Amino acid sequence: MSIIVYHTEGKSNIVTLNDTKRLLVGRSKKCDVSFPGDFRASKNHCEIYYFKDKKQFALKDLESKNGTILNGKPIVHDVLLSHGDKVTVGTSTFLFKNENETSHNLIQTKKVDKFAVKTAITNSENFDNDSTETCLIPRLDNIKKKDMVLRKNANFKIGDKIDKFVILEKISSFMQGDDYLVKQKNEGEFLLRIFNKPFEEYAPATKEFLKIMRNCIKIDEPQLQKYYDCGVFEGLCYFTAEYTPNAENLDDKIAISAPMQEIDALNILLKIGDALEKLKLLGSVFHGDLTPESILYDNGKIKIKDYGYANWMNRYIEPFITASSPWYLSSEQVLQKSVDWRTDLYSMGIILFQMISGFVPFHSDDVKELREMRINYQFPTPQDYNQNILTSELTLSIITKLTATESHERYVKWSDFFDAIKNGCRKLSYDTVSAAPILPKKGQKNVQNMFSNYFNG
């Protein structure tokens, strides 16, 4: 028989675990084990359930705000419980006891102040008036927990397993990891992205990754790539997502169609903004690494992929400035400042510029040179690259607003962005006069040198 022992309202409580029912623990009074006065505990903090394969009870964190602590360490995935395990939620603690196991883990007794911790566990059913009492102290070195073996490399072969996923083929590689086509039994095929930098099991990077991705997994919106699962395999963080092999991306469309008509480019930007606004509303998430390659055309509709984790990658995997496509990074990313949803506005301004002109405004494979361009050169106009391009003043003002160096100078709200784009589309729809090409706005003298270097190699 397995039980949970905890202390509330001046008395100890015992709850018998049932192998057919999950035990919910949290601050809510509806929980099976409730700590209503502990405001560091989440309403539904964690749960204990019976894992049939191992015939043991397991502990699962329910994406709690402050984490679930097992024997002094936060858990990042489900963990099997052993006799004598001590679990902390918020500032409250409970003890897991399994009478079927031997009690050799509980080998010493000592006097403790039962009020020194909120939930001291005693070997008697009730506390007396004395503030000290004999209790059993778990010997943690006898509670066996399997240490995570860190993988020395991120190379996987067809047929290898990453947790419950079997690798069918390698799709692609990128600087920070690899994409695989995988299959899960009875669940179909998925894209699995795994990062190549290993972390210790309880490292802040793994906990933050799982928290971010679990939040993204909740998002279910046709305009956003669906995420299904996430985990840490031998120290490597991974997630699975829907696989769309036949979807065209915006990078392909630009290569074929640029320079595009202004109204077509603005309508595409409107759809991108609509998807990103939903991302912010549904999950308080921004993309952070928006490029034409991350914008898919799936059955004629826009779908944004690879969102949500760019800031985590910048902190733990690789700085933004070493990104494979740094031309779309915002000024604050290039200068390695803090970022928020407005960084996506800057990237959208670069994409709009590229759709209209066929070029990105600043192009260099040398990240140091790119940074110097951002700092020292005036932002060009599409006409600086192609004087035959006709661009309205309204569209130029949208590009200027989106690509403002300081994030607070960009659109303050998504609604402001939508108003500007819709106004631009309406104006372009009503304009029927075939105007002469606009005289290009000349930038600083050294901008011309930059373009000469670009076209000459």
Image (tube, grey):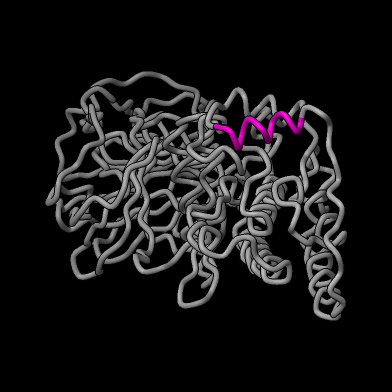
The answer to whether one can see residue 218 in this image is no
Question: In screen coordinates, is 316 left or right of 438?
Answer: left
Question: In screen coordinates, is 125 left or right of 278?
Answer: left
Which residue occupies 22% across, 37% down?
155
Question: Which sits in the foreground, 388 or 96?
Answer: 388
Task: Tell me where residue 181 appears, x and y as whole percent.
Answer: 26, 57
Q: Quadrant of residue 266?
A: bottom right
Question: In screen coordinates, is 245 left or right of 89?
Answer: left
Which residue occupies 65% across, 58% down?
280
Question: Which sits in the foreground, 284 or 105?
Answer: 284
Q: Which residues are magenta?
A: 447-457
Which residue occupies 67% across, 33% down?
452
Is 95 colored magenta in this rendering? no
Task: Tell me where residue 50 appears, x and y as whole percent.
Answer: 25, 57
Question: Which sits in the foreground, 287 or 109?
Answer: 287
Q: Across the whole image, how many numbered discs are drawn on residues?
A: 0
Which residue occupies 71% across, 51% down?
386
> Is residue 300 shown above or below 105?
below
> Is residue 431 shown above or below 451?
below
Question: In screen coordinates, is 311 left or right of 139?
Answer: right
Q: Quadrant of residue 184?
A: bottom left
Task: Tell me where residue 337 appears, x and y as whole percent.
Answer: 69, 30
Task: Tell me where residue 294 appears, x and y as whole percent.
Answer: 50, 55
The answer to whether one can see residue 362 in this image is yes
Q: Quadrant of the C terminus?
A: top right
Is 451 colored magenta in this rendering? yes
Q: Main secondary structure of the magenta part?
A: helix
> Is residue 295 shown above or below 298?
above
